[in-house]
């Protein structure tokens, strides 16, 4: 499948990037070979690896810093205190820790091989993470692991009653933190409402672009420059007039100024796209990052949370990308679809949405759908079979399926958090169980 996508979508594309499209294939092959020849060693030592990982993580917090939050920061973060533990040497962001840590807790407790000493330390560390390193991703990870464990082996919670109580506390306490509730509920904005807003903004762009469709490149460039100069002259005049007027009397002119600024931003984005769209993804993203302040934003949007904006933007990119190329955009080529639709169609509520998560979609599920299209169904069928496969121990299913499921929804690419390793292991374990059958 990797070779198919590389041959038909990347090699014949002017956006082929060695770093993103070719080199990662060798890493995938390396992980595949490791799983093939060392699968038994990996599986048999998971318990020791999990404990060593958690103890190293505990030690790492002694090298972290404490950052005191402003009122605005604490209001927007899922934090129970006016400070947070920052700059952890292993996990730079709380969300990354939430993606990986929780499945290891469920795995270790499902083995039922812990001494009382280890159990006490793990309980205390879990409580510490919940209180001082809490995030929406951590809450989401607990929910995913909890539900998967109920499906795979609901008796787990009868054997680990105190751990079950801790999970209930994680579910309930954030309800009393308004910023957490806002982050969760705000992400549930209906996609149809977002789509209507984007269509309206897209039509505004089309109206500006219509002036350029019948011109050659030289004529278009001249018109671009002249329009920018004309708008800039109007903006400067309005600034001077508004400075001399009373605030209330200047309100109509301020609205006109706002409209002109939006028009200029749309025009700048159109000129930027025309000049740079054929550059490599990394170079294009760096240019977008430098110029994003001049791009238009959707001032009428009710979204005022960056996490929600990133997820909804990725959903919109995925929908359009799948509609245009249902058989996929190519391995590790999400960024091509991202740049096309963000530059040509989408007007986000924040300027940094133009470049944030441009190559990982903040979700491996969306990334897989964009890159593999209809072929991604084979991956999902394999995962479903793995979860319900009775020939695989429950502890292995809980660990691997939890890590994969969490990063399917809130991930950072194929090579972070052990996603590729876990996914390839599920294929090998399923295949081995079929051979035994």
Image (spheres, rainbow, N blue to C red):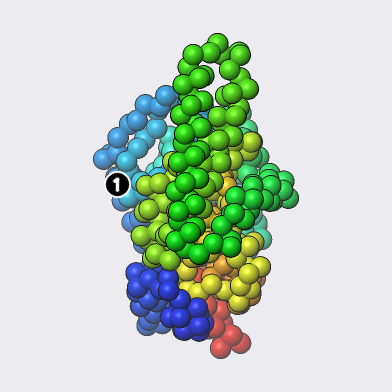
Q: Which residue is mark 1?
A: 89
228 is higher (above) or lower (below) than 54: above
Q: 18 or 25, which is in the foreground?
A: 18
Q: Please indicate, yes or no, whether residue 276 appears anywhere in the rendered image.
A: yes
Q: Position of residue 82 (x, y in %)?
A: 43, 25
Please determine whether, in this image, residue 270 is positioned above or below residue 75: below
Q: Nearer the viewer, residue 291 or 214?
A: 214
Dividing the picture into quadrants, the one containing residue 51 is bottom left
- Residue 292 relative to residue 110: left or right: left
* Residue 361 shows up from this direction: no
Q: Residue at x 42, y 24 (%)?
A: 70
- In this view, the residue farthest toward the left is 63
Residue 52 vs 250, above or below: the answer is below
Left or right, 384 with respect to 120, comes to: right
Q: Nearer the viewer, residue 364 or 96?
A: 364
**Quarter of the image with the C terminus in it:** bottom right
State the image coordinates of residue 230 (x, y, percent, origin top left).
49, 39
The answer to whether 301 appears left or right of 286 in the picture is right
Dot 1: few (<14), some (14–19), or many (≥20) neighbours within 10 Å?
Answer: some
The number of callouts visible is 1
The structure residue drawn at horizontal position 51% and vertical position 32%, both measured from the top left corner, is 234
Residue 381: % across, % down: 63, 74
Q: Secondary structure at mark 1?
A: loop
Residue 405: give x, y in percent of width and height.
56, 60
Give the residue drawn at x 55%, y 39%.
262
Q: Residue at x 63, y 62 (%)?
A: 320
In the image, 89 versus 172, the foreground residue is 89
């Amino acid at each position: 499948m990797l070779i198919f996508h590389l041959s038909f979508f990347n090699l014949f594309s002017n956006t082929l990037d060695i770093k993103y499209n070719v080199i990662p294939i060798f890493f995938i092959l390396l992980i595949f070979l490791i799983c093939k020849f060392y699968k038994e060693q990996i599986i048999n030592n998971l318990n020791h690896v999990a404990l060593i990982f958690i103890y190293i993580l505990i030690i790492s917090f002694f090298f972290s810093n404490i950052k005191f939050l402003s009122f605005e920061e604490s209001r927007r973060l899922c934090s129970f205190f006016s400070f947070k533990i920052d700059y952890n040497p292993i996990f730079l962001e709380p969300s990354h820790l939430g993606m990986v840590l929780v499945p290891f807790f469920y795995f270790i407790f499902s083995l039922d091989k812990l001494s009382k000493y280890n159990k006490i330390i793990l309980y205390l560390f879990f409580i510490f993470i919940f209180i001082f390193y809490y995030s929406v991703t951590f809450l989401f990870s607990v929910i995913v692991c909890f539900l998967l464990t109920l499906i795979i082996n609901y008796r787990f919670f009868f054997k680990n009653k105190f751990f079950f109580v801790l999970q209930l506390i994680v579910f309930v306490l954030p309800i009393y933190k308004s910023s957490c509730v806002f982050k969760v509920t705000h992400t549930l904005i209906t996609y149809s409402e977002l789509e209507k807003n984007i269509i309206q903004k897209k039509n505004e762009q089309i109206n500006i672009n219509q002036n350029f469709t019948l011109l050659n490149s030289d004529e278009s460039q001249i018109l671009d420059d002249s329009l920018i100069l004309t708008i800039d002259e109007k903006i400067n005049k309005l600034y001077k007039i508004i400075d001399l007027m009373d605030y209330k009397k200047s309100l109509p002119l301020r609205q006109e100024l706002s409209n002109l600024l939006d028009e200029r931003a749309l025009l700048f984005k159109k000129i930027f796209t025309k000049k740079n769209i054929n550059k490599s993804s990394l170079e294009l993203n760096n240019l977008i990052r430098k110029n994003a302040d001049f791009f238009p934003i959707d001032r009428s949007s009710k979204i005022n949370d960056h996490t929600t904006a990133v997820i909804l933007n990725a959903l919109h990119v995925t929908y359009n990308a799948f509609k245009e190329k249902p058989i996929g955009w190519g391995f590790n080529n999400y960024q091509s679809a991202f740049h096309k639709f963000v530059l040509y169609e989408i007007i986000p509520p924040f300027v940094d949405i133009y470049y944030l998560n441009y190559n990982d979609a903040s979700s491996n599920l969306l990334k897989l759908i964009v890159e593999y299209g209809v072929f991604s169904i084979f991956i999902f069928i394999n995962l479903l079979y793995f979860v319900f496969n009775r020939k695989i121990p429950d502890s292995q299913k809980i660990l691997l399926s939890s890590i994969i499921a969490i990063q399917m929804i809130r991930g950072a690419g194929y090579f972070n958090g052990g996603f590729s390793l876990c996914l390839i292991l599920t294929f090998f374990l399923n295949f081995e169980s079929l051979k035994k059958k």
